[in-house]
Image (cartoon, helix red, strand yellow):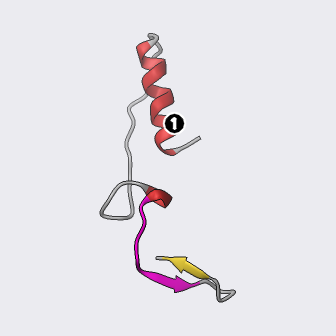
């Protein structure tokens, strides 16, 4: 698991007393959100299909 679901799972485990490791998050874009972060910038993949950059 990854992303927000995993962060929520760690939070829930910590609230129940579990020993949770330190979490460090990295994001390639200037805004958080991964695939849910829409951008108008588009390009094409190797098959000519439109993709968001």
Q: Is residue 7 above or below residue 41?
A: above
Q: Viewed as shown, does residue 38 lie left or right of 43? A: left
Verify whether residue 9 appears in magenta.
Answer: no
Which residue is at the far top? 17
Count up the numbered dots. Answer: 1
Q: Is the magenta region chiefly helix, strand or loop?
A: loop
Left/right of residue 49 with respect to residue 22 in the rendered view? right
Q: Position of residue 19 (x, y in %)?
A: 45, 17
> Does residue 47 lie above or below 40 as drawn?
below
Q: Is residue 41 magenta?
A: yes
Please tell me in which quadrant of the rendered image residue 1 appears: top right
Residue that mark 1 sits on? 6
Residue plotted at (41% across, 80% down): 41
Q: Residues within 10 Å of mark 1 (few under 14, many from 20)?
A: few
Question: Would residue 38 appear left or right of 46 to someone viewing this image?
Answer: left
Closer to the camera in the image, 36 or 21: 36
* Residue 38 against residue 20 in the figure, above or below: below
Q: Is residue 23 visible?
A: yes
Q: Secondary structure at mark 1?
A: helix
Quarter-of-image position of residue 29: bottom left
Task: From this view, report whether residue 36 is shown above or below residue 19.
Answer: below
Q: Residue at x 40, y 77 (%)?
A: 40
Q: Please give the name of the residue rendered at 46% of the width and 31% of the height, measured from the top-left corner.
A: 8
Of all residues, the one furthest to the right in this rendering is 47
The location of residue 34, given as percent across then percent down, is 45, 57
Q: Quadrant of residue 2?
A: top right
> Which residue shows up at 51% across the image and 28% down it?
9
Farthest left residue in view: 30
Furthest toward the bottom, the residue is 48
* Residue 20 appears in the figure: no
Q: What residue range appears in magenta?
A: 37-44
């Amino acid at each position: 698991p990854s992303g927000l679901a995993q962060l929520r799972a760690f939070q829930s485990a910590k609230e129940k007393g579990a020993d949770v490791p330190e979490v460090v998050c990295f994001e390639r874009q200037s805004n958080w959100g991964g695939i849910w972060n829409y951008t108008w910038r588009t390009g094409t993949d190797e098959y000519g299909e439109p993709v968001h950059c």
